[in-house]
Image (spheres, grey):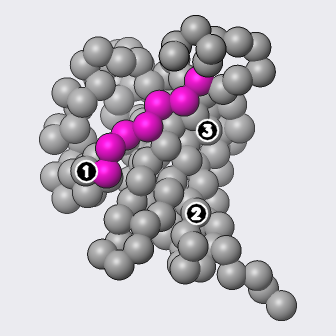
Amino acid sequence: GLERSKRKGFPRVHAFNTFFFTKVKSAGYQAVKRWTKKMDIFSVDIILVPIHLGVHWCLAVIDFRKKSITYYDSMGGSNNEACRILLQYVKQESLDKKGKEFNTNGWQLVSKGDRKST
Protein backbone atom coordinates (compact mmCIF):
# COMPACT_ATOMS: atom_id res chain seq x y z
CA GLY A 1 0.00 0.00 0.00
CA LEU A 2 1.97 2.90 1.36
CA GLU A 3 5.31 1.95 -0.15
CA ARG A 4 3.98 2.08 -3.66
CA SER A 5 2.66 5.59 -3.27
CA LYS A 6 6.07 6.78 -2.12
CA ARG A 7 7.59 5.91 -5.47
CA LYS A 8 8.74 8.96 -7.35
CA GLY A 9 6.13 10.56 -9.52
CA PHE A 10 3.13 9.26 -7.63
CA PRO A 11 1.31 11.97 -5.73
CA ARG A 12 0.50 11.21 -2.12
CA VAL A 13 -3.26 11.33 -1.79
CA HIS A 14 -5.61 11.49 1.16
CA ALA A 15 -9.36 11.05 0.74
CA PHE A 16 -11.86 12.27 3.27
CA ASN A 17 -15.06 10.31 3.65
CA THR A 18 -18.40 11.57 2.45
CA PHE A 19 -19.42 13.06 5.77
CA PHE A 20 -16.46 15.38 6.02
CA PHE A 21 -17.74 18.19 3.83
CA THR A 22 -21.29 18.06 5.19
CA LYS A 23 -19.88 18.33 8.68
CA VAL A 24 -17.40 21.14 8.08
CA LYS A 25 -20.03 23.07 6.15
CA SER A 26 -22.79 22.74 8.73
CA ALA A 27 -20.84 22.67 11.97
CA GLY A 28 -17.54 24.34 11.17
CA TYR A 29 -13.92 23.48 11.81
CA GLN A 30 -14.34 22.42 15.44
CA ALA A 31 -16.55 19.54 14.30
CA VAL A 32 -13.85 18.00 12.11
CA LYS A 33 -10.58 19.01 13.68
CA ARG A 34 -10.17 15.66 15.41
CA TRP A 35 -10.59 13.80 12.12
CA THR A 36 -6.93 14.40 11.32
CA LYS A 37 -5.52 13.67 14.75
CA LYS A 38 -3.30 10.93 13.36
CA MET A 39 -2.63 12.49 10.01
CA ASP A 40 -0.91 15.56 8.66
CA ILE A 41 -2.83 16.89 5.68
CA PHE A 42 0.18 19.01 4.76
CA SER A 43 2.28 15.91 4.19
CA VAL A 44 0.24 14.85 1.17
CA ASP A 45 0.06 16.36 -2.32
CA ILE A 46 -3.63 15.98 -2.94
CA ILE A 47 -6.75 15.75 -0.79
CA LEU A 48 -9.96 14.41 -2.28
CA VAL A 49 -13.22 15.66 -0.81
CA PRO A 50 -16.42 13.98 -2.01
CA ILE A 51 -19.42 16.29 -1.90
CA HIS A 52 -22.95 15.00 -2.05
CA LEU A 53 -25.56 17.37 -3.40
CA GLY A 54 -28.65 15.35 -2.65
CA VAL A 55 -29.06 13.90 -6.11
CA HIS A 56 -25.55 13.60 -7.41
CA TRP A 57 -21.94 13.57 -6.31
CA CYS A 58 -19.25 16.10 -6.88
CA LEU A 59 -15.60 16.07 -6.01
CA ALA A 60 -13.34 18.78 -4.70
CA VAL A 61 -9.61 18.35 -5.08
CA ILE A 62 -7.18 20.26 -2.87
CA ASP A 63 -3.83 20.25 -4.64
CA PHE A 64 -0.95 21.53 -2.53
CA ARG A 65 1.50 21.31 -5.44
CA LYS A 66 -0.60 23.39 -7.81
CA LYS A 67 -1.98 25.59 -5.03
CA SER A 68 -5.50 25.02 -6.20
CA ILE A 69 -8.86 23.79 -5.05
CA THR A 70 -10.83 22.46 -7.98
CA TYR A 71 -14.47 21.53 -7.85
CA TYR A 72 -15.68 18.94 -10.36
CA ASP A 73 -19.40 18.65 -11.03
CA SER A 74 -20.75 16.18 -13.56
CA MET A 75 -23.93 18.24 -13.79
CA GLY A 76 -22.01 21.34 -14.75
CA GLY A 77 -22.71 23.28 -11.61
CA SER A 78 -20.13 25.54 -10.06
CA ASN A 79 -19.59 25.82 -6.36
CA ASN A 80 -17.23 28.53 -5.24
CA GLU A 81 -18.70 28.30 -1.78
CA ALA A 82 -17.38 24.74 -1.41
CA CYS A 83 -13.91 25.84 -2.52
CA ARG A 84 -13.94 28.72 -0.03
CA ILE A 85 -15.06 26.46 2.81
CA LEU A 86 -12.22 24.05 2.03
CA LEU A 87 -9.61 26.78 1.81
CA GLN A 88 -10.83 28.06 5.15
CA TYR A 89 -10.52 24.52 6.51
CA VAL A 90 -6.90 24.29 5.34
CA LYS A 91 -6.15 27.64 7.00
CA GLN A 92 -7.68 26.55 10.31
CA GLU A 93 -6.00 23.16 10.17
CA SER A 94 -2.65 24.88 9.76
CA LEU A 95 -3.26 27.12 12.76
CA ASP A 96 -4.54 24.25 14.87
CA LYS A 97 -1.99 21.56 13.98
CA LYS A 98 1.06 23.62 13.00
CA GLY A 99 0.50 26.72 15.06
CA LYS A 100 1.08 28.91 12.05
CA GLU A 101 -0.78 30.89 9.42
CA PHE A 102 -1.28 29.10 6.12
CA ASN A 103 -0.13 31.25 3.23
CA THR A 104 -2.97 31.33 0.71
CA ASN A 105 -0.98 33.56 -1.61
CA GLY A 106 -1.25 32.35 -5.19
CA TRP A 107 -3.97 29.83 -4.42
CA GLN A 108 -6.82 29.58 -6.89
CA LEU A 109 -10.32 28.24 -6.57
CA VAL A 110 -11.70 26.64 -9.72
CA SER A 111 -15.09 25.16 -10.57
CA LYS A 112 -15.16 22.71 -13.46
CA GLY A 113 -18.47 21.57 -14.85
CA ASP A 114 -18.37 18.82 -17.45
CA ARG A 115 -20.74 20.66 -19.70
CA LYS A 116 -18.83 21.82 -22.74
CA SER A 117 -19.42 25.45 -23.55
CA THR A 118 -20.26 25.81 -27.23
Q: Label 1, on which residue?
A: 19
Displayed quadrant of residue 118: bottom right
For residue 63, which numbered disc appears in the image? 3
Secondary structure under the numbered disc 3 in the rendered image:
strand
* C-alpha gap between disc 2 and disc 1: 18 Å
The residue stretch that appears in magenta: 12-18
Task: Judge whether 4 appears above or below 11 on screen.
Answer: above
| Mark 3–mark 2 distance (CA, rounded to whole Å) | 13 Å
Q: Position of residue 15 (x, y in %)?
A: 44, 37
At label 3, which amino acid type do we have?
Answer: Asp
Image point 35% across, 72% down: which residue?
53
Is 105 colored magenta in this rendering?
no
- What's under tag 2, amino acid-wise? Tyr
Residue farthest to the front?
A: 1
93 left or right, relative to 75: left
Between 100 and 93, the one lying in front of the other is 93
Image location (x, y in percent) of residue 28: 21, 48
Of label 1 and label 3, which has the lower sequence position?
1
Q: What residue is drawn where x is 57% and y is 73%?
A: 74
Q: Which residue is mark 2?
A: 72
Give the mark toward the camera: 1 or 3: 1
Callout 2: 10 Å neighbours few (<14), some, many (20+)?
many
Dot 3: within a 10 Å radius of its alpha carbon, few (fewer than 14), some, or many (20 or more) residues? some
